[in-house]
Image: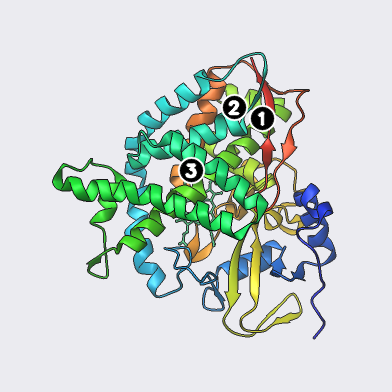
Amino acid sequence: MPEIPFWEPLSEEALEDQRHTYDRMRAACPVARSPRGVTFFRHADVLAAARDPSTFSSEVSAHRQVPNGLDPPEHAAFRAAIDPFFTPDRMRALEPRLRLTARAAVSALPRDSAVDVVADFGYRFAVAAQSEWLGWQGAEAELLAWMHENHAATRSTERSRLAATAAAFDGIVSTQVERRRRLGSAAPDDPTTELLSVCVNGETLSDGDIVSILRNWTAGDLGSIAASLGVVIGFLATHPEVQASLRAGASDVARAIDEMLRIDDPFLVNRRVTRAPVEIAGFRLEPGTRVYLNWTSANRDEAVFGDPDAYRPDEHASKNLVYGEGIHVCPGRPLATLEMVVAVEELLRQTTSIALAAEPRSERETYPVGGWRHLFVVLT
Ligand code: HEM
């Protein structure tokens, strides 16, 4: 068997333009290894791995992560407990409140001058919307400060700083949980309180698992919503014809957002570890190999989408991997979509134009996320 070619995902060159580096890798060597693990770049390989959890295990971390770090059969019971939080009925009931949140966030943005829609809109709106959903009103400032510190800690790659931010987050979550336990039957009627009485295999969840689930619903997702909003607003600002069609109500907003995220997926990778020998693209992986499923690359695979930058929402919807695939497919997708739809609708309703600002210069984000770090636009 041939040796898997080597690449350096954290080289300056790769970080400078992640998406196009992945495009080149996918064409030149669709499977590549680095000291961190083996990356799959092609749609077919990413899909096959995501659909085969017995070979590609999600138990990649020393810490228990619920449900994303669980394998079958344990995983299914937790998903059955979590999925009911995101039903269409629940999302319909939540929509008016999130719309008001979006309306206020858009109203607060300046007009006719450059504004960074990642920091000043994406992060703020994500925190406000998630707090509204979970019943964490009042914790927004603390969450926002935490997001900024987490971002800086991730970038510093200092282990002690990362451990401190993780502990700080668990502190924020635990405060919410403990308050509801203290209040007992007087606890607010919200998803956080509801989680306390959820049963898996006939037993209520342990505090550790509750914190892990809430961490998943907040820490990870605030970042992905903020990054995704940056990508979507960036696309609108650079594609006036798409912006006009959405303003005219001529296209489906949710589907449009999915396609913009396919073209520039800011949720770069998820990890797996092999449990059995497996052959992929002509290479053999031994058991225990760390694997990265590169969603950003898979979503731009020419073999599936033709020109990766061609905007064709209806045609590409069924192959879109922005929310993953298989048993770990994103349970929060309905909520993420609702949040982004109301945000985009409010932005369009309150403006006549969204355009890129000439100054300051926008900046791309780098690993472990994609999209924009700072995106300056002018709202009129
Ligand atoms: C634009 C925003 C979002 C994107 C792009 C996104 C993307 C993804 C992807 C690709 C996965 C698959 C992970 C894997 O296969 O290992 C995933 C899983 C997950 N997502 Fe999301 N997500 C988003 C928002 C959310 C939100 C708002 C929530 C909840 C409030 C959420 C909760 C989760 C959870 C709990 C999992 C793990 C599921 C499991 O392991 O069974 N996500 N997400």
Q: Amino acid at mark 3?
A: Ala
**Residue 331 appears anywhere in the view:** no
Q: Nearer the viewer, mark 2 or mark 1?
A: 1
Q: Mark 2 = which residue? A: 246
Within 10 Å of disc 2 (Cα), the crowding (few <14, some 14-19, many 20+) is some
Within 10 Å of disc 1 (Cα), the crowding (few <14, some 14-19, many 20+) is many
Provide residue 48's location: percent of width, then percent of height. 61, 70
Q: In terms of depth relative to the viewer, which is nearer, 39 or 241?
A: 39
Q: Is residue 147 above or below residue 199?
A: above
Q: Is residue 265 above or below residue 64?
A: above
Q: Mark 1 = which residue? A: 236
State if disc 1 and disc 2 touch (CB < 8 Å). Answer: yes
Cα distance between the residues tagged 3 and 2: 19 Å
The answer to which of marks 3 and 2 sits earlier in the sequence is: 2
Q: Mark 3 = which residue? A: 336
Q: Amino acid at mark 2?
A: Leu
Q: Is residue 307 above or below residue 51?
A: above
**Residue 82 appears anywhere in the view:** yes
Secondary structure under badge 3? helix
Residue 356 located left or right of residue 86: right
The answer to which of marks 2 and 1 sits earlier in the sequence is: 1
Provide residue 102's location: percent of width, then percent of height. 46, 27
Q: Residue at x 67, y 16 (%)?
A: 113
Determine the residue located farthest toward the front in the rendered image. 160
